[in-house]
Amino acid sequence: MIKNFFLVGLLASAISCLGSKRTSEIPLSVIEFHTTNSPCIDAIIVNMRAEGCEDIYHSQDQMGHVYACASNDKISVGNYSSEIFLVINPDISGNPREIPGLPFCADASVLVFIINPY
């Protein structure tokens, strides 16, 4: 009895899924992208580009790598294009509590902080 009820439910679900059309209302844009092998850094770069930042500033100092949007003509200003990101190696960073910023992202190879320029 329960087995038959389950089969009827499964069949009804399959039929309803076949009849529905899935369309994406969000326009997708394709951006040329080369991975850095870090999901955190990749997310920063992709989201900056998605917000219209075409010129991404990158520098390296004793603290780590700094990423920021350097475009003056941003199409849409969002969180990624208006923040300064500090990317450090967790193996040589020392105490993360001493980093002057807010924790943003962490993966196996980096720790990312948002630096407050104010």
Image: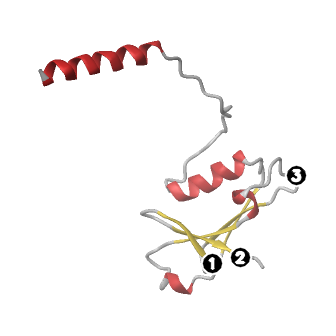
Residue 26, quarter of the rendered image:
top right
Numbered label attached to residue 101: 1
Extreme residue toward the front, this view:
1
Numbered label attached to residue 73: 3
Q: Position of residue 91 (x, y in %)?
A: 43, 76
- Residue drawn at point x = 42 percent, y = 19 percent: 17
Considering the image in quadrants, where does the N terminus appear?
Answer: top left
Q: Earlier in the sequence, mark 2 or mark 1?
A: 1
Extreme residue toward the right, this view:
73
Separation (CA) of disc 2 from disc 3: 22 Å
Residue identifier under label 2: 116
- Residue drawn at point x = 61 percent, y = 80 percent: 62
- Residue drawn at point x = 68 percent, y = 31 percent: 27
Q: Earlier in the sequence, mark 3 or mark 1?
A: 3
Separation (CA) of disc 3 from disc 1: 26 Å
Q: Position of residue 69 (x, y in %)?
A: 76, 59
Please tell me whether mark 3 sits on a helix, a strand or a loop: loop
Residue 29, quarter of the rendered image:
top right
Q: Position of residue 116 (x, y in %)?
A: 71, 76
Q: Amino acid at mark 3?
A: Asp
Q: Amino acid at mark 1?
A: Gly
Q: Earlier in the sequence, mark 2 or mark 3?
A: 3
Nearest the viewer among 37 and 52 is 52
